[in-house]
Amino acid sequence: MRLVIGCKKSSKRNERPSPVNPDAMTTQHDSSLASTYERLLTLWTSGVRDYHSMLSDYLTANSIFVAVIGLIVSRESLAWSFTVLIGLLCVFGILLCLQMAIVLGRLSGQNALWEWQLRGIELAEGWQGQKLITGLYQLHETRRSIENPKNVPAVFTPNWAFRRHRQWWAHRAISFPWFFGCVYGLFFIWAVTQFIHR
């Protein structure tokens, strides 16, 4: 019995840790980086889809509000109740514009975060995949052409829209709420003047 235990102890002492294969670690790191990239790319694409979906919904709601207000204003003789209704619709429309700016701004910020994370992965050492987000960043921010000798044409140059997208009026999360807010403001001023003259 003691002989067996002594043999086991001596065998444990003679055991050495197996050397770590650096190639296996690199492969595992690359696969983990690729899976993270795929998840972030899915979040980014779904975020862009949600942004455009919410933008379409808010545009539809604001268009309906403006159409209803314009239909009421087009009446020849407005009763006092209709003037109050126009004022209330304008107040709700302005609140809707504020909500639109907040929601679209939050979604735009989230998409910018996913782009930043994806660009960090694409710029990491050992990344072998395509650099889609880095290319978009190069077109949007630095306005530099993208070169690929294997493609036809070999150089992709940014157009005028890439050079103007940073203007405030080009941001839909800013320009559309301002536009509809001004429309509601004009209708509200008109309703207040009509109410005062009565």
Image (cartoon, grey):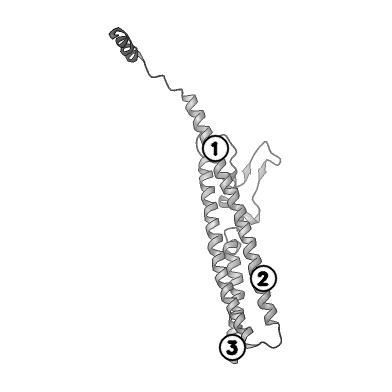
Left or right? Give the position of 113 relative to 64: left
Residue tagged 2? 64
Above or below: residue 19 compared with residue 89: above
Question: x, y (%) of residue 79?
Answer: 65, 88
Q: Looking at the image, which residue sits at the far front? A: 1
For image coordinates 53% across by 63% down, the residue present is 102
Three-letter code, disc 3:
Phe
For image coordinates 56% across by 76% down, the residue present is 91
Residue 143 in sight here? no
Q: Residues within 10 Å of mark 3 (few under 14, many from 20)?
A: some
Who comes first in sequence, dot 1 or dot 3?
A: 1
Q: Residues within 10 Å of mark 2 (few under 14, many from 20)?
A: few
Q: Looking at the image, which residue sits at the far bottom? A: 198
Q: Quadrant location of residue 131?
A: top right
Q: Give SS at disc 1.
A: helix
Task: Depth check: give the residue in front, 169 or 100.
Answer: 100
Task: Depth check: give the residue in front, 157 or 18.
Answer: 18
Q: CA distance from mark 2 to mark 3?
A: 24 Å
Q: CA distance from mark 1 to mark 3?
A: 62 Å
Residue tagged 3? 195
Q: Quadrant location of residue 86?
A: bottom right
Task: Depth check: give the residue in front, 179 or 56.
Answer: 56
**Could you say which disc has been placed on residue 35 in the image?**
1
Q: Quadrant of the C terminus?
A: bottom right
Who comes first in sequence, dot 2 or dot 1?
A: 1
For image coordinates 50% across by 35% down, the residue present is 125
Task: Depth check: give the residue in front, 158 or 56.
Answer: 56
Three-letter code, disc 1:
Ser
Question: x, y (%) of residue 103?
Answer: 54, 61
Q: Quadrant of the N terminus?
A: top left
Three-letter code, disc 2:
Ile
